[in-house]
């Protein structure tokens, strides 16, 4: 069983010295957290867990980001605490980052490329840190520098967790409904893609051309400076504004927050099939409200490329959800998903109908905690995915990226306005007016 699981790992997997070294690092991080607790530093459990994840490094920070973006799967206090993982992780000292700059751009990078670099990071995330700088030609830029050894850490950690999840699901089948293996497999694919900054630069260029071709003036992406870019260093135009993580400042800066976020959502929605790729990681840390009112999309490390088949399936699924057409919902899931078994779409449709009827019953029985709350869109979507999986349908990566991003947009309503229903009504109104069929042709 274990050999079969190991055979699924990428060729980059190493279970020798690097793995033992990483296990020692992880043990030290957990030991430090435990010692702090014994010595009297005893914060609330969510804070303690977040600190431990940050100390254990990139992989666990990524898992923390998943918690932060999944309000339907985790308690609210943990979701709120782990939002700090979006861009506020413990920074690596600049002296270590300088070594990467020198190796990637050459020993004369300060003379030939940069006039100055602020050693205090603007943001510190799981894979990279971002610094403000100025080019010798006078432009203000930001430099995204990959953390030392982060790729090796990711490979080692994720392979270990993948094996552990496989074993856990085989020993305890009940855990299959939590889709631990699928979740870790998705994280593994996406985070390893983030380690190639040349690819990210290309993603930015593709999306920028999409904005230009559609004459979109509401959303902007940063310009890439290729002379100062390499696989582990990405230099971009500095966008000045307020990140969406700064709730209070954003609300003070505008009297039309819904309109600004609506423009961001509409742009993202059109890019699903109007562009070669769509941004698949627009969490609050990757959206900036610029000083001139435009929206800045940053960090294109994770993108999705959706197939025509999935486009058609998503289009059909959204429309059938709006019309409560359970039979078509079931058939749409079959178009989008993958399965080795014959799926009884009639039974799947009945299960979907039962879920919706149970949700409507919550209106007349608001004290029941055993019924799904259809007023929470993310809960509905996650439950629909779970029902499909029970019937043997597994959704492809491109669909899970779409679903994750839709949940991000839903979370902004809660985070910013405490008016999630109003914000989601605006999103759904845009989707209803949106001519999917024309776009997909």
Image (cartoon, grey):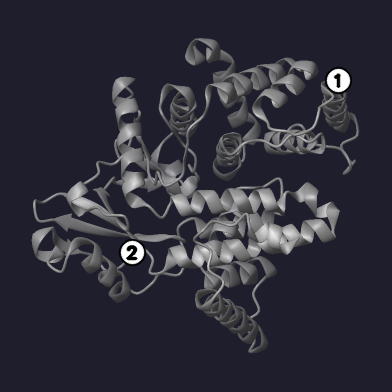
Q: Position of residue 112 (x, y in %)?
A: 9, 60
Residue 217 visible in this rendered orientation of the protein: no
Tell whether 77 sits left or right of 113.
Answer: right
Q: Which corner quadrant of the image does residue 418 belong to? A: top right
- Front in this rendered view, residue 364 or 131: 131
Q: Which mark is residue 61?
A: none
The foreground one among 234 and 22 is 22
Residue depicted at 25% across the width and 41% down the height: 223
Name the image quarter holding residue 118.
bottom left
The residue pinned by badge 1 equals 346
Q: Nearer the viewer, mark 2 or mark 1?
A: 1
Numbered circles on residues, count: 2
The percent position of residue 167, horizontal first and vertical second, equals: 76, 61
Quick one: label 2, few (<14), some, or many (20+) residues within 10 Å? some
User: From the viewer's perspective, is residue 133 above or below residue 40?
Assistant: above
What residue is pinned by disc 2?
A: 121
Residue drawn at x 49%, y 61% as measured from the top left: 12
């Amino acid at each position: 069983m274990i050999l079969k699981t190991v055979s699924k790992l990428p060729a980059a997997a190493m279970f020798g010295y690097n793995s033992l070294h990483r296990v020692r690092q992880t043990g030290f991080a957990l030991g430090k957290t435990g010692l702090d607790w014994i010595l009297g530093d005893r914060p609330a459990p969510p804070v303690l867990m977040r600190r431990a994840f940050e100390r254990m490094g990139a992989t666990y920070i990524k898992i923390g980001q998943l918690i932060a973006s999944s309000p339907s799967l985790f308690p609210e206090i943990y979701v709120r605490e782990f939002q700090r993982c979006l861009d506020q992780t413990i920074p690596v000292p600049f002296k270590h980052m300088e070594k990467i700059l020198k190796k990637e751009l050459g020993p004369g990078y300060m003379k030939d490329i940069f006039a100055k670099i602020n050693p205090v990071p603007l943001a510190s995330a799981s894979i990279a840190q971002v610094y403000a700088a100025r080019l010798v030609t006078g432009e203000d830029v930001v430099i995204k520098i990959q953390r030392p050894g982060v790729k090796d850490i990711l490979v080692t950690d994720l392979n270990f967790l993948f094996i552990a999840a496989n074993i856990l699901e085989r020993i305890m089948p009940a855990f299959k409904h939590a889709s631990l293996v699928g979740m870790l497999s998705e994280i593994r694919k996406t985070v390893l893609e983030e380690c190639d900054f040349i690819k990210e630069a290309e993603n930015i260029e593709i999306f920028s051309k999409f904005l230009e071709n559609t004459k979109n003036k509401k959303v902007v992406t940063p310009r890439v400076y290729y002379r100062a870019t390499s696989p582990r260093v990405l230099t971009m135009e500095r966008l000045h504004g307020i990140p969406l993580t700064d709730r209070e400042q954003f609300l003070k800066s505008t009297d039309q927050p819904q309109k600004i976020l609506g423009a961001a959502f509409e742009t993202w929605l059109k890019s699903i099939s109007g562009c070669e790729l769509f941004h698949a990681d627009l969490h609050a840390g990757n959206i900036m409200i610029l000083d001139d009112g435009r929206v800045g999309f940053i960090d294109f490390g994770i993108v999705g490329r959706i197939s025509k088949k999935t486009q058609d399936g998503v289009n059909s699924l959204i429309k059938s959800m709006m019309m409560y057409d359970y039979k078509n919902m079931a058939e749409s899931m079959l178009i989008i998903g993958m399965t080795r078994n014959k799926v009884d779409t009639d039974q799947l449709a009945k299960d979907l109908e039962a879920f919706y009827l149970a949700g409507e019953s919550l209106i007349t029985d608001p004290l029941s905690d055993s019924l799904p709350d259809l007023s929470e869109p993310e809960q509905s979507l996650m439950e629909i995915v779970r029902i499909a999986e029970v019937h043997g349908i597994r959704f492809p990566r491109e669909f899970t990226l779409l679903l994750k991003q839709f949940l991000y947009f839903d979370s902004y309503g809660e985070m910013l306005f405490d008016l999630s229903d109003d914000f989601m009504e605006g999103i759904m109104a845009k989707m209803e007016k949106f001519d999917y069929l024309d776009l997909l042709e």
